Image (cartoon, helix red, strand yellow):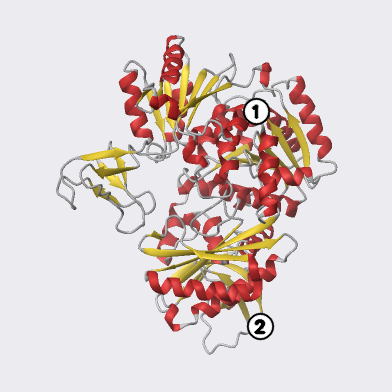
Amino acid sequence: MLFADVILPLPLHDTFTYEVPPEMESDIKRGCRVVVPFGTKKIYTAIVMKVHGERPDFDVIKPIKELLETTPIATEKQLQFWEWISKYYICSMGDVYKAAIPGSLKPKDEQAIREKNRRRKNILGDAFLSDDITCLSPLSEAQGKAYDEICTSFETHKTTLLHGVTSSGKTEIYIHLIDKYLKEGKQVLYLLPEIALTTQITERLERVFHDRMGVYHSKFTDAQRVAVYQKQLSDEPFQLILGVRSSVFLPFNNLGLVIVDEEHETSYKQQDPAPRYHARNAALVLANMFGAHTLLGTATPSFEVYHAARKDRYGYVQLNQRYKDIQLPTIQIVDLKEARSKRKMKGAFSFELIDAIREALENKEQVILFQNRRGYSNFIECKNCGWVPRCEHCDVSLTYHKKTDQLTCHYCGYTYKLPEKCPACEEKHFANKGLGTEKVEDQIKDIFPEATTLRMDLDTTRSRTSYENIINEFADHKADILIGTQMVTKGLDFDNVSIVGILDADHLLHQPDFRSYERTFHTLSQVAGRAGRKHRQGKVFLQTRNADSDIIQQIVNNDYWGMFFQQMTERKDFHYPPFYRLIDVYLRHRDNQLLGHLADDMAERLRNVFGNRVLGPDCPPVSRIQSLYIRKIMIKIEHGASIEKVRNVLTAIQNQMLEQTVAHGLTIHYDVDPM
């Protein structure tokens, strides 16, 4: 008799053993989907991890109800990759399974499974196909030199960093590398941090690679994602996959090259739910499993990657010249304290920025305005008593959205009706505090009523085609001004943008995070790089109250190296990445006082093992989300330490905590290499 150990799509750390019916014994394999009963009434689609003849020591072993296919839906390499994700990021295999497999391939009940099987179509999506194939564009002298240096670097390094300034033409180098590896019969994975970028790059790649390319991201329908997934399992898979972080979970059979564009982007890190993986780091492991090369490209390298390149663990290629010798934009600092004291502001805009926008509009040029907060105002406040509406479920004030005339919690998504009067003093007058993209749009329309505007933030990009529509409209000059959050910083390429306005640089600087200066440099340098793309040098207006600070001067002078060495000294002294690895331990409970005691208990248990490597517990900046209070414990681990031993210690202590009767309702999760 055979038995199968299976993974369920649940946050459970163990596999579960089922009896294999005799009629399935010849067909069942590791990686196949099976339908199994769980508990008294539940039925799930599970993945077979192991088939064996060892009967477990249980009185009753339930049989598998159905084998859904005889060809594995998860390949051997995928399952090995899943196991690495589970171990490194300290999460269950069930969490990884849920993230890795498209939804309709893991329906929960038997009827849904049969219905999906009946209705499934081979949908590849006509967005992947084009009528003709365009030849590769010639590389400039600087691009050609960088291409040759990358190829040479790959002879001695599996991973290479391409450090190229904004608008240096890194994408064309990627295209030539892709062509090289496809001609060698290899597959290529091209990762981007945001869906917004795929809409621009897809057309460029399609003109060269035609139907050899597949696109994979979360804005696609489930049927489209299933079709791409199944094609990758077929005898004729896509040779090139263009996608966002979830693309690392697709099946590959002959991966030769992985490109991680804008490798510094925090969007590569999955936050919630588990697995909380970093797609760049996961892609490095995936490439290593295939013996493939990895190219990390960016104008502003992350400290971890640049440090590895300096230590010669990664190859390093520099590209300092912009395409067609266009100069980097000039950056003009606007001192907001001085501008406000001299009454040289209109709303969020300095007079200098208003004049520059006016000149750009008169010259039929375009403008990008960056404000990294959505909504109309950060919060509203009673003018009489200072009352501020807060979320009932989270420890945050509510953001006002003018379009919907609602107050919204940006953590749990709950919406509230705008009160007619203050519940504290019954006055009816409220003040809007802070600046969001909605208010920016309103103010710019007041100043330039003849200008057409577009807004790109989470509120305007919820639908599947919204990114593409906004980008295409702005690229076709159907709008003069694009207003956006950090979405507009991520490598978008517009020919006619001459002015970029950074309305409030200080919001990024003042985050309570050791990475705040690094992030500020990344974000502001990237958004500045959207100016002056092809026709002439652009201009950036950087509005700040900290005009003399080191980081602002480093951004103005494009002094990445000065910023890097200054910050690295502090990182080394205080045991932060890239010199140490961080693991954040989060505890959540509905009872705040009990949670405090439990967090103290767990921190003490951790200190008994890790000593002064343990910091906390502390309340995070937002200490309650969805009615659960939160405590955080940070562990700093030397790079030489075994992550497997660390995981075993953490798991053992977690089990000790959860076995306590008093800990009922406590949840614990881990964020490895937090961003």
Residue 577 in sight from this viewpoint: yes
Q: Position of residue 159 (x, y in %)?
A: 76, 44
Q: Position of residue 270 (x, y in %)?
A: 54, 52
Going by the image, does 436 lie left or right of 63?
A: left
Going by the image, does 528 lie left or right of 134?
A: left
Q: Position of residue 418 (x, y in %)?
A: 22, 45
The residue shown at (75%, 62%) is 640
Q: Quadrant of residue 301?
A: top right
Towards the viewer: 2 or 569: 569
Towards the viewer: 321 or 250: 321
Towards the viewer: 476 or 406: 406
Quarter of the N terminus within the rendering: bottom right
Q: Which mark is residue 54?
A: 2
Mark 1 crowdedness (10 Å alpha carbons): few <14, some 14-19, many ≥20:
many
The answer to whether 111 is drawn above or below residue 150 in the figure is below
The residue shown at (68%, 41%) is 566
Q: Position of residue 384 (x, y in %)?
A: 20, 44
Going by the image, does 25 lie left or right of 395?
A: right
Mark 1: secondary structure: helix
Q: Which mark is residue 51?
A: none
